[in-house]
Image (tube, helix red, strand yellow):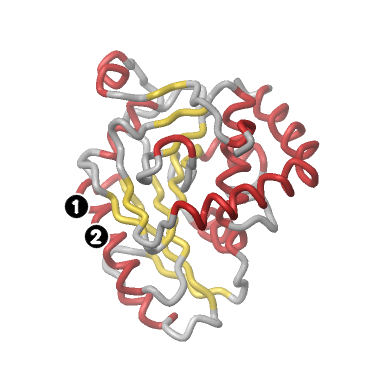
Amino acid sequence: HNDYWFFEPDFRVDNDYIESTQTSVYKNAKISVLIVGYSRPEGAMRCVTSARLTADRPELVEIMVVTDESDPLSERYKNLPETNSFIITQHETSKKWNHLYSKCAGDIIVMVADDVIFESRGWDELLRRAWPDDGIAVMFSDNGDGFELLEFPVISRKIAESLGYAAYPGLHHVGLDSWWEIIGKNLGRLYYLGDVWKLRHEHYEVSHVHNRRDRKGVNMIRDYEHLILEETEKLRREM
């Protein structure tokens, strides 16, 4: 695999790191969990339940889920407890995440799919403690493959507001993961929380995702590199 797509994180967040962090701005931050779904309402229920049960301060965790009108099970997403559910016309992943971003109120934005299980107790406090006071960071958990294949980015509202989106329009899951990973690395603010925060991706297949990642990665270098650099510079001015 091309090393360009398997960065060493700038910060490996472990228990020692958390204990030594003295963040103030984000210590009471509200967190929005944005779940993109399609035909897996039972999976979405498990995701929602696990996120709430493992949060230290669930009252500061907002959960939203979206699917689209082509989903034959879309109505069943409306029954998720303590969750704001949306059914929209667009099928595209980035449009779904951006729809939820436009509705959410969190200072920290966690983007996942409806086949993800939150496994680490206190994951919300880990994010609050790890987040830098200037708000500029891209964070990833461990999905079972370490930092060699990062999935499900976490960004701040400050980043999303500066750039105007949570998910760059037109990109899908793997491309969006890579987009935020590259920007995080370019800024020197790529955080890996895998030593303390575990997400289980239930339909994760290493070989399949690696193949997709390589193809998407090549296309991104060719088609998006100048845009990534432009977006990086916008954020660098916020640091």
What residue sits 37% from the left and 36% below the top? 29
Q: Position of residue 26 (x, y in %)?
A: 38, 29
Is residue 236 left or right of 52 when viewed as pictured?
Answer: right
Q: Quadrant of residue 113?
A: bottom left
- Pointer 1 with pointer 2, Cβ within 8 A: yes
Disc 1 packing (10 Å; few <14; some 14–19; many ≥20): some
Count of numbered labels shown in the rendering? 2
Q: Position of residue 45 (x, y in %)?
A: 29, 67
Quadrant showing the C terminus? top right
> Mark 2 sits on what residue?
49
Q: Position of residue 55 (x, y in %)?
A: 23, 45
What residue sits 25% from the left and 23% below the top? 15
Q: Quadrant of residue 221?
A: top right
Image height check: is 217 above or below 20? below
Task: Please name the amino acid that badge 1 sits on.
Answer: Leu
Is residue 6 left or right of 40 when viewed as pictured?
Answer: right
Cα–Cα span, label 1 and label 2:
6 Å
Q: Could you say whether the residue bearing mark 2 is in a helix, strand or loop? A: helix
> Mark 1 sits on what residue?
53
What mark, if any, has residue 199 been given in the picture?
none
